[in-house]
Image (tube, rainbow, N blue to C red):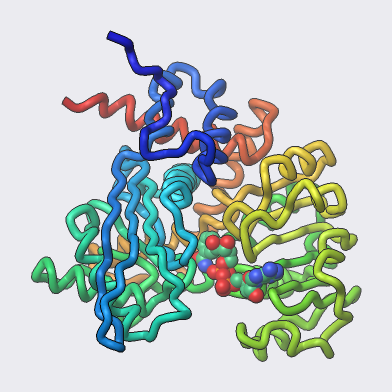
Amino acid sequence: MNQPSQHELPSYLNPNELGPWGIYLEQVERVTPYLGKLGKWVETLKRPKRILTVDVPVELDNGTIAHFEGYRVQHNLSRGPGKGGVRYHQDVTLSEVMALSAWMSVKCAAVNVPFGGAKGGIRIDPRQYSERELERVTRRYITEIGMIIGPDKDIPAPDVNTNAQTMAWMVDTYSMNTGQLSTGVVTGKPLSLGGSLGRVEATGRGVFTVGVEAAKDAGLDLQGARVIVQGCGNVGGIAAKLFHEAGAKVIALQDHTATLYQDQGLDIPTILSQYHPKDGLAAHTQAGECLQADEFWALDCDILIPAALENQITAANADKIRAKIVIEGANGPTTPEADDILTQNGITVVPDVIANAGGVTVSYFEWAQNFSSYFWEEALINERLGRMMRDAYHATAAVAKTHNVTLRTAAFISACTRILEARDLRGLYP
Ligand SMILES: NC(=O)c1ccc[n+]([C@@H]2O[C@H](COP(=O)([O-])OP(=O)(O)OC[C@H]3O[C@@H](n4cnc5c(N)ncnc54)[C@H](O)[C@@H]3O)[C@@H](O)[C@H]2O)c1
């Protein structure tokens, strides 16, 4: 009988079109030589533990029935329950949800929070549906995946096009189905339903915290440092505010509507206090000079923070970048080719799995507070967040130095080592 190849792809993937899962597999290949004896378990990283595909049928407001495709993928649960957001987007694919779940495994292990990696998604364009329809979609989806989620099993959170209200519906649905209020089944909840202080600011605060450490390592004084930020939302807006407060000059800010530039530094507090996502920065053109979108990347600066979308720094613009440090606020903003170009040009990249892990870290705090029903003060949350982010950055920098690799490879080495150590200690069941 033929033995199946160790590296054979699962039958549910198209080998000619691996999508984001293919990028993740490449990253695992890069890290494998550094795993030593744990390398014998590496195949575990290349196969999600559990994939659930569900049909989500709902009655629309006009009385017709619509069906949506939903997923929940649990990539690895060796270190703790699954953790990862649920996105609502018409282009969600299984490959994407698989890759995002794997990156959550890596992120949770890289910052050493006791979670595995998971992710969910529904193929729906939420702009086409009413609030009531989206509520019905959410409730049916949570009921369909109910058997594999729970405060001890897998804890969803908001992601693209889902928010605190979506999480409140999820809590209610899960609690009605199980017969008891379970606030710990999701994180990113409203404060009045077991949410945590500091969660809204957490990701931007984490970006700032690792930025301070990376600047110290690069011998860069933050006072007067020139910072440019792509994205003016939850992550980019908060990061810009904190760098401004620390004495840096945020000389450029870009969103989907405009790119604003001011050589002496933009008035960030004023811009943010009047910013409305719908109108965007295009409503603030008096605050600075308006540049073409692609001029943003070539600006003379010390720190560049991509905090908007994936695939923004590519082979086409990476060579123009003049920053000393790139701090990835967004998930996957740098393509692998661009990453190599930045490294060749001596630019330090603090990878997303460390830089934007502030959100999942405070989600961990939210979950822990839900278990004890004892809520912490914001100052304590920020102090603990700061400590965990600094520790994660320095541990990663030390691995990078030992192996003479980038911070991204170092973060993958630390994370995959932690995941596979847990796997090795637990052994194979049965
Ligand atoms: N919010 C979190 O806690 C969190 C945690 C981890 C990672 N992230 C990642 O950070 C990124 C941003 O998330 P967010 O929560 O700040 O989202 P958000 O929706 O609050 O803000 C997104 C920003 O990106 C801008 N943008 C959109 N398209 C753009 C374009 N083509 N060019 C320039 N700017 C554009 C928007 O104008 C907006 O200012 C995403 O990649 C997200 O996955 C967020």
Asked where in the image residue 409 lies, by quadrant, the reply is top right
Say whether residue 419 is visible. yes
Nearer the observer, 288 or 257? 257
Q: Quadrant of residue 286?
A: bottom right
- What residue sits 33% from the left and 60% below the top? 70
Picture residue at 76% right of the left edge, 51% below the top: 325
Q: Is residue 239 above or below residue 118?
A: below
Left or right placement of residue 329 versus residue 118 in this view = right
On the image, the x and y values in percent for residue 4 come to 35, 17
Q: Residue at x 26, y 75 (%)?
A: 58
* x, y percent for residue 131: 37, 85
Q: List the single residue furthest toward the front.
A: 64
Which image quadrant: the N terminus?
top left
Q: Quadrant of ligand 1?
A: bottom right
Whether residue 349 is situated above or below residue 207 in the rendered picture = above
Q: Position of residue 78 (x, y in %)?
A: 31, 38
Residue 129 lies, in percent from the top left, at 40, 81
In the image, residue 320 above or below residue 266 = above
Q: How many marks?
A: 0
Foreground of the two, 255 or 189? 255
Q: Residue furthest left?
A: 179
Question: Residue, x 11% and y 66% (percent of image)?
Answer: 178
Left or right of 323: which side holds 142? left
**Residue 234 visible, this angle:** no
Horizontally, is 252 left or right of 162 in the view?
Answer: right
Q: Quadrant of the C terminus?
A: top left
In the picture as drawn, the residue positioned furthest to the top comes out as: 1
